[in-house]
Structure formats: C-alpha cells, structure tokens
C-alpha cells in the first residue's frame, strides 16, 4: 500500500507540476502568444487552457475532490496532451518534442491507474 501511494503521488506531482508550470508560462510569458499563433491557435484559447490546467491540477491535488470531477480532470489532461502532440507535429515542430508529451501522458496514466488502485469504487448493485 505504501509503495502504491508513493507511485501515485510521484506520478500525480509530475503531471500537475507540468500542468501548473505550463499554465504559469501561458499566463505570464509573452512569447506564448507567438507560440499559440505558430500552432494556429487563437489567443483566447491560451487563456482558456491556462484556467483549465489550473482547475484540473487542483482537482487532482485536493483530497476532497469528488470522484467524477477527478475523472474529468484526468480526461481533460489526456485530451490536452494528445492535442498538443498533434498540434506540434502538424505545425512542423520536431518529433523530439513528443518525448515530453509522451512521458507526461505516461505520468497521467500511472496516476490514474494508481488512484483507482488506492480508491477502489464500490459499484451500486
């Protein structure tokens, strides 16, 4: 059980750390406007993504988050990471950039699996 908690929290902290750093960068780094334009994305999406990453990180870090909300956070982060990979690859960015997206996606999967290992659901009969 202790090993499972360590694995869960390590993966979750990696995932949320990346998402919070990304949100901070989107919000305060002026170069991000150009990066979003390079990907063909509007500026309002940068703001929307910043808010979503902050809320999703809180949903995964706070212990009293309802399970359904936590599921939405995992799903949203999964869509975000897959979409980021597609956006970068279709814009001609280096394939090497996908090493990061893939490793963060692996962290997401490990966090999700171990969350459910630590909190098994009791299905209604």
Image (tube, rainbow, N blue to C red):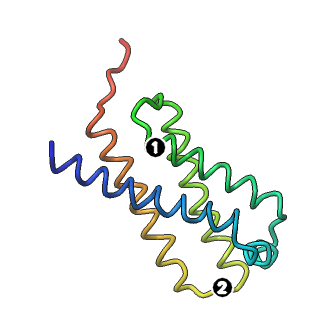
Check disc 1: other Cα within 10 Å, few if <14, some if 14-19, many if 20+: many
Figure quadrant of residue 30:
bottom right
Does 34 sit above or below residue 46? below
Does 121 sit above or below residue 15? above
Q: What residue did someone put label 2 on?
A: 93
Which tag, 1 or 2, sits closer to the chain's start? 1
- What's the residue at 30%, 46% (across, down)? 114
- What's the residue at 36%, 12% (across, down)? 125
Where residue 74 is drawn, which disc sits there? none
Does 77 sit above or below residue 42? above
- What's the residue at 40%, 61% (across, down)? 14
- How far apart are labels 1 and 2 at the CA level? 30 Å
- What's the residue at 36%, 51% (across, down)? 111
Element type at marker 2? loop
Element type at marker 1? helix
> Residue 45's x, y, as percent?
78, 58
- For the N terminus, the quadrant is top left
Q: Are marks 1 and 2 in contact (CB under 8 Å)?
A: no
Check disc 2: other Cα within 10 Å, few if <14, some if 14-19, many if 20+: some
User: Is residue 18 shown left or right of residue 122?
Assistant: right
User: Is residue 31 shown left or right of residue 89?
Assistant: right
> Residue 40's x, y, as percent?
81, 72
Between circles 1 and 2, the one closer to the viewer is 1
Q: Return the residue nearer the eye: 80 or 48.
A: 48
> Residue 25's x, y, as percent?
64, 68
Q: What residue did someone put label 1 on?
A: 60
Residue at the outermost front position = 28
> Residue 124's x, y, as percent?
38, 14
């Amino acid at each position: 059980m202790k090993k499972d908690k360590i694995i869960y929290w390590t993966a979750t902290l990696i995932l949320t750390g990346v998402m919070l750093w990304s949100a901070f960068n989107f919000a305060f780094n002026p170069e991000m406007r150009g990066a979003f334009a390079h990907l063909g994305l509007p500026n309002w999406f940068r703001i929307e993504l910043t808010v979503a990453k902050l809320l999703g990180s809180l949903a995964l870090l706070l212990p009293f988050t309802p399970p359904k909300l936590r599921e939405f956070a995992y799903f949203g982060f999964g869509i975000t990471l897959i979409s980021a990979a597609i956006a970068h690859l279709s814009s001609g960015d280096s394939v090497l950039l996908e090493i990061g997206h893939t490793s963060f996606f692996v962290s997401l999967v490990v966090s999700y699996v171990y969350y459910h290992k630590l909190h098994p659901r009791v299905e209604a009969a």
